[in-house]
Amino acid sequence: MRTTVDIPDSLYRDLKSKAAGEGRSVKELILRGVEIELQLTPRRRRRPVSLPLVRSKQPGTVALDNAKIFEIIPFP
């Protein structure tokens, strides 16, 4: 399939220089980049987030400072 992509002149010069240095064509270099990009984007499964339960004598209000947070949540 053919497609048209606008590449800035300075980027194209760098691309062409790299391709020549590797003994490849610009097309080969672009296709390799597309293939790598498609391999590196697997969908990650999201894990459920476990949040700490903070008890309060008055539900809806919690008075916390940094010291109290460090007591409640174990930080490495």
Image: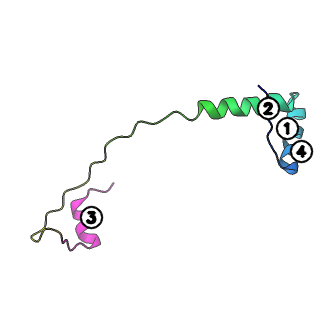
Q: Left or right: 4 with respect to 41?
A: right
Numbered tag placed on residue 29 in the rendering: 2
Question: Disc 1 or 3, which lies upstream in sequence?
Answer: 1
For mark 2, give the secondary structure.
helix
Marks 2 and 1: in contact by CB < 8 Å? yes
Residue at image mark 3 = 70
How far separated are the C-alphas under marks 2 and 4? 13 Å
Q: Judge by depth and name the residue closer to the eye, 73 or 55.
A: 55
Question: Disc 1 or 2, which lies upstream in sequence?
Answer: 1
Residue at image mark 4 = 13
Question: Disc 1 or 4, which lies upstream in sequence?
Answer: 4
Residue at image mark 1 = 18
Quarter of the figure that contains the C terminus: bottom left
Tell me where the magenta segment starts and ends, as one range: 61-76
Quarter of the figure that contains the N terminus: top right
For mark 1, give the secondary structure.
helix
